[in-house]
Image: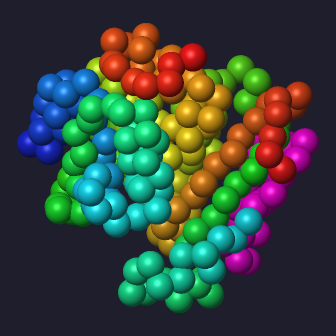
Amino acid sequence: MSIQSTIESKLTDAFSPERLAVINESHLHAGHQEHFDGTGETHFRVRIVADAFAKMNRVERHRAVNELLAEELKDSVHALAIEPAAPGEPTRW
Amino acid sequence: MSGINEFIDNEVKSSDVVLFMKGTPGFPQCGFSGQVVQILDYLGVEYKGINVLTSDELRQGIKDYSNWPTIPQLYVKGEFVGGCDIIREMFQASELQAFLNEKGVAAKGAA
């Protein structure tokens, strides 16, 4: 299973999101470091709208996602941008 | 407390605003660190940049200290505020300026 699919399924299981987009942005970082050729799964953006975030502040929301994906972040994912929102909050996507 | 923890603890408590980043404010070596530098510079905030690329121990140590897996990390008055996404969100919502002023840190363009 690709890292992208793993991230999608973990987030889906944990948060039952209303909306979810996991975007592989690795190609945007090609050449930034010697081993980034842009074809891998090193940089991701997670956009997620879920009820669970309603009672969390910004740091708590990011921690919740980071902790869920700790294994991926430790091993292979170099950067994870997160855009969490609760239902009804404005999003840019 | 281990040596690196003590070092970090001392840094975040001895300057009002501390940014742990890749590279330096004058020469960021990562786009995410660079974004936070731009925001702080735009607001005219005085801060201390600490380059985590100078030491593997520091690079790992700051992640353990804050329980936050990525760089950059911004501290204000010893308190962890967030990484690139959070700082950008706060800035765009004009919350960062208000937050800094609340903490007694001078920032331009306060709401």
Q: Residue furthest left?
A: B3
Q: Position of residue B26 (x, y in %)?
A: 27, 57
Figure check: B73 above or below A20: above
Figure check: B97 above or below B71: above
Q: Position of residue A49 (x, y in %)?
A: 82, 40
Front residue of B62 and B38: B38
Report the magenta residues as a range: A1-22
Q: How is the image coloured?
A: rainbow
Magenta stretch contains residue A19 = yes
Question: Taking the image as drawn, is residue B108 in sight?
Answer: yes
Q: Residue at x 43, y 10 (%)?
A: B102
Front residue of B88 and B70: B88
Front residue of B72 and A57: B72
Q: Position of residue B76 (x, y in %)?
A: 34, 26
Question: Taking the image as drawn, is residue B86 in sight?
Answer: no
Q: Residue at x 37, y 13 (%)?
A: B103
Figure check: B54 above or below A57: below
Q: Residue at x 56, y 41 (%)?
A: B88
Q: Residue at x 76, y 36 (%)?
A: A85
Q: Quadrant where the N terminus of chain A lies?
A: bottom right
